[in-house]
Image (cartoon, helix red, strand yellow):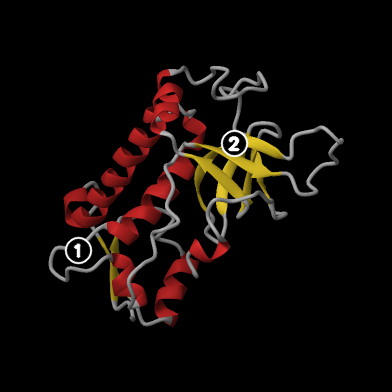
């Protein structure tokens, strides 16, 4: 599939020298909407609103802090590209781009409780727990792994070895709590503090209820 033309507003992320060179090198015609006229780019504006509404719902339904907004938007986009049926073609965006049906067996409930295996990330004593409790935040964009917030280390990690607790009763109990409740962070740390450190690039690990083969090949 080759892109012939795109339309954007005059935002600096689109109207700059490097992006113009990229379009020229790939034979892409770059059109602009009139200033302060978002209705000329209605498709993108509606898609942006859909992602915003979904992300707001995902965060508030799970009583998660606002600094997880980027993970919520990324997860919403990941899911929509694989489940949203285009009205004319009767295909999902993933099918149009990849030419095959997407695998969604690895999907998990955003914000659910999960457990991440500690396989060498830190030294364990004989009676220390082998897994850390965490919060599921989505899917890695660069590898076949899940993105999770580790409540013990207060960092976002990527790991395939994760066990999930998607029990509806537990989910409802967590949603009814406040954002800085002990249910969200049993270590006692305040989740309302500034955004946690970036994801640890080293692979995590846990006994997982989802085998590696269930994750997407791309």
Question: In the image, 20: left or right of 38?
Answer: right
Question: In the image, 100: left or right of 42?
Answer: right
Q: Residue 206 at what x, y percent from top left?
A: 66, 49
Q: Which residue corresponds to mark 2?
A: 134
The Cα atoms of the two marked residues, 1 and 2, are separated by 35 Å
Q: What is the quadrant of residue 98 in the picture?
A: bottom left
Front one among 131 and 79: 131
Question: In the image, 121: left or right of 193?
Answer: right
Residue drawn at x 21%, y 61% is 85
Residue drawn at x 70%, y 55% is 203
Q: What is the quadrant of residue 173 in the picture?
A: top left
Q: Residue 187 at what x, y percent from top left?
A: 67, 22
Q: Are marks 1 and 2 in contact (CB under 8 Å)?
A: no
Residue drawn at x 44%, y 81% is 25
Q: Which residue corresponds to mark 1?
A: 86
Q: Secondary structure at mark 2?
A: strand
- State the mark number for residue 100: none
Question: Where is 157 relative to 86, above or below?
Answer: above
Question: Where is 198 relative to 44, above or below?
Answer: above
């Amino acid at each position: 599939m080759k892109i012939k033309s795109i339309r954007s507003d005059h935002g600096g992320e689109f109207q700059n020298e490097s992006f113009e060179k990229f379009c020229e090198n790939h034979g892409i015609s770059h059109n602009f909407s009139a200033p302060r006229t978002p209705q000329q780019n209605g498709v993108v504006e509606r898609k942006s609103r859909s992602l915003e509404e979904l992300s707001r719902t995902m965060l508030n339904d799970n009583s998660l802090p606002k600094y997880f907004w980027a993970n919520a938007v990324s997860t919403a986009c990941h899911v929509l590209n694989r489940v949203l049926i285009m009205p004319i073609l009767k295909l999902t965006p993933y099918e149009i781009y990849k030419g095959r049906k997407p695998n969604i067996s690895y999907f998990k409930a955003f914000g659910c409780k999960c457990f991440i295996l500690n396989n060498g990330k830190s030294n364990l004593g004989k009676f220390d727990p082998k897994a850390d409790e965490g919060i599921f935040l989505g899917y890695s964009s660069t590898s076949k792994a899940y993105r999770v917030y580790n409540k013990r280390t207060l960092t976002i990690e990527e790991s395939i070895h994760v066990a999930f607790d998607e029990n509806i009763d537990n989910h409802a109990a967590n949603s009814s709590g406040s954002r800085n409740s002990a249910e969200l962070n049993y270590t006692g740390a305040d989740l309302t503090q500034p955004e946690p450190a970036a994801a640890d690039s080293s692979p995590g690990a846990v006994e997982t209820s989802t085998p590696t083969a269930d994750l997407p090949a791309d």
